[in-house]
Image (cartoon, grey):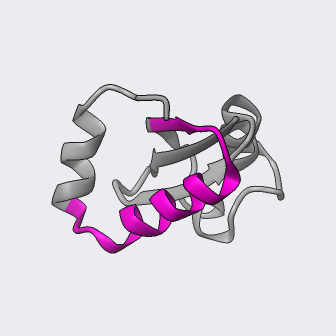
Amino acid sequence: MWFVYILKCSDATLYTGITTDLKRRVAEHNNSPLGAKYTHGRRPVKLVYSKEFKTKSLAAIEEARIKKISRKEKLNLCQKKSKSF
């Protein structure tokens, strides 16, 4: 399974990514050099949204869609419950 996720950074910005292991990836963003350069200087980060997909392709399509929407739309999305597809 693949996950699309949104993190809220310490400076209140949002970061979107994909992974197969949410717990590990959030830990990497917070504690490891394996986290994204963007989140490295904005620690700690908090997981505020995730959505599960059966394939990497579907997750990547959703990640790209989320990255194109406005901050307000992303925050609205975070208010909804996580879903599986």
Compared across the picture, whether 82 is left or right of 44 comes to left
Compared across the picture, whether 45 is left or right of 54 comes to left
Instruction: State the image coordinates of residue 48 (x, y, percent, origin top left).
Output: 41, 36
Observer-nearest residue: 37 or 75? 75
> Can you say whether 4 is above or below 15 in the image?
above
Q: Residue at x 24, y 63 (%)?
A: 71
Query: Magenta residues: mostly which secondary structure?
Result: helix
Q: How many marks?
A: 0
> Can you say whether 21 is above or below 73 in the image?
above
Question: Outermost residue, bottom direction?
Answer: 68
Instruction: State the image coordinates of residue 42 (x, y, percent, origin top left).
Output: 53, 58
Q: Residue at x 58, y 61 (%)?
A: 60
Instruction: State the image coordinates of residue 29 (x, y, percent, origin top left).
Output: 68, 49
Q: Which span of residues is magenta-colored?
A: 50-71
Is residue 70 highlighted in magenta? yes
Observer-nearest residue: 59 or 68? 59
Is residue 52 highlighted in magenta? yes
Image quadrant in which the N terminus is located: top right
Q: Residue at x 39, y 66 (%)?
A: 65
Q: Residue at x 47, y 69 (%)?
A: 64
> Can you say whether 48 is above or below 73 in the image?
above
Instruction: State the image coordinates of residue 14 (x, y, percent, origin top left).
Output: 40, 57
